[in-house]
Amino acid sequence: MLLKAALEEERSSWRRSAAARSSRPWQASSKIRHATTHQLGLDTLDATGVHAVRARVVDDGDLASAGGVTSGLDLGLYLLEREVGPQIAHTVEEFAPMAST
């Protein structure tokens, strides 16, 4: 219920940023962007003009990225916490199907 209410809220930054995204947000300005990806793709990412960072999660404002498949779970929880608060992120983490394995 909390997550549904948060996503339906008109002033949610999640909704605003989803509407404003481009296919290549790092090219939207002359600012050097920071991002991460799977370790095998870091050189390719760096070649696009993005400063590739070796990390599980990188938040560069309107561009957030994860360092691989399992890091995507961390990114999802991080974004939940950033956008709708730690209570919802913790609840999702606690009741995720893999939490019991």
Image: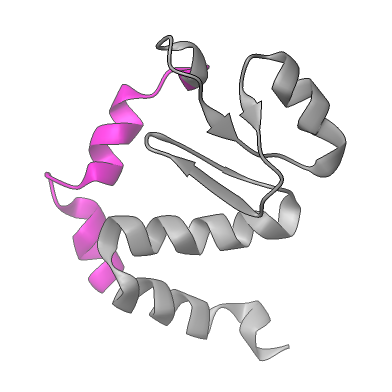
Total numbered labels placed on residues in the image: 0
In the foreground, 42 or 99: 42
Quarter where residue 34 is shown: top right
The relative height of residue 87 versus residue 26 in the rendered view (above or below) is below
Residue 22 forms part of the magenta stretch? yes
* Magenta segment: 2-25
Residue at image position (12%, 45%) is: 11
Q: Residue at x 40, y 11 (%)?
A: 29
Residue 44: image location, x then y, percent: 79, 22
Residue 35, percent from left and from top? 59, 35
Q: Is residue 50 left or right of residue 92?
A: right
Left or right, 63 with respect to 45, comes to left
Image quarter where the N terminus lies is bottom left
Residue 27 seen in the current view: yes
The residue located at (46%, 60%) in the rendering is 78
Q: Is residue 95 left or right of residue 101?
A: left
For the question of whether residue 1 can be seen, the reply is: no
Q: Is residue 34 left or right of residue 87?
A: right
Q: Quadrant of the C terminus?
A: bottom right
Asked if the magenta segment contains residue 54, the reply would be no
Q: Is residue 77 above or below residue 79?
A: below
